[in-house]
Amino acid sequence: MSTDTWSLAGRTFHSRLIIGTGKYKDIDETREAIRRSGAEMVTVALRRVDLSPGKPSVFDAIPKDIALLPNTAGCYSADEAVRTCRLARELGMAEFVKLEVIGDAKTLFPDNEQTITAAKILVGEGFTVLPYCTDDPITCKKLEDAGCVAVMPLAAPIGSGLGIRNPHNIHLILESVKVPVIVDAGVGTASDAAVAMELGCAAVLMNTGIAAAKHPVLMAEAMKNAVIAGRQAFLAGRMPRKSYANASSPEAGLIE
């Protein structure tokens, strides 16, 4: 699997697991979860990080060779999201940005219209944009056409752990766009991550599924293994589903 890589804007990655940095009990747990996950990219919510000089922050837990994906979590308009991304650029960490524009405080579903508006502005300003959106093929196609380098449809509401609620829509998205499809939000356990990869997604992004586990560091490693297994299963090609039994052993040559 060492040769099974994927790319974003000219940068090559081996790990297909992207993890968040929120909700861990402390910096040490965050650091160890990142290490055990094998992730090569982590996302950080800029609006929820104390950037005061001299104070410990989540950035202390992130190895220097890992790609940062600053995100616009907590933004409810295109304007807020664009300003947050500009802040990331000023801080010197805006190679990639995860665009997230929330439309509803209860479900945390994204506002697709505002997301597309923000994406067009950010791409025009030279940002490399990875947008979080609903599992809607039309929205994903519009985001690709706007110049986004990937699309990140939700599996289920953020932090719900419900897993992929609509695999068919993910399949339609994979057929609709040529950019990488990264399942984002709603992954609760290793089998959810494996399903995303078995569908043919390029990667999976998660935070709560790891950080809210009883043993987050162990779950981080479980997610790493699940993503690898799911990707291998996709490449191997699953057997056809059948309505009736089919004996594993050949019947020819049976001794009466």
Image: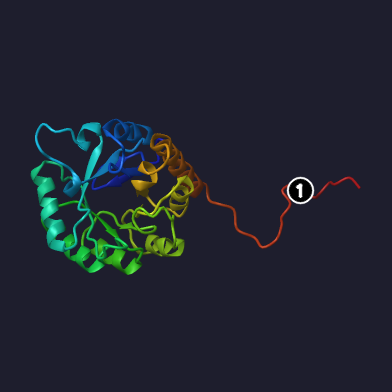
**Vertical comparison of 2 with 204: above or below:** above
Bin the neighbour count of mark 1 within 10 Å (Cα to Cα): few under 14, some 14-19, many 20 and up.
few
Residue lying at the far right in this picture: please name it. Answer: 256
Residue 80 image offset from top left, x and y in percent: 13, 58
Residue 126 visible from this viewpoint? no
Q: Which quarter of the figure has residue 18?
A: top left
Q: Which quarter of the figure has residue 220?
A: top left
Amino acid on which the number 1 mark rests in the picture: Pro
Residue 108 visible from this viewpoint? yes
Residue visible at 40% across and 35% down?
Answer: 2
Which scheme is used to colour this image of the protein? rainbow
| Front-most of residues 83 and 172 | 83
Residue visible at 53% across and 51% down?
Answer: 237
Q: Is residue 111 left or right of residue 219?
A: left
Residue visible at 46% across and 42% down?
Answer: 226
Quarter the N terminus occupies:
top left
| Front-most of residues 76 and 255 | 76
| Front-most of residues 152 and 81 | 81
**Vertical comparison of 146 with 21: above or below:** below
- Badge 1 element: loop
Residue identified by numbered label 1: 250
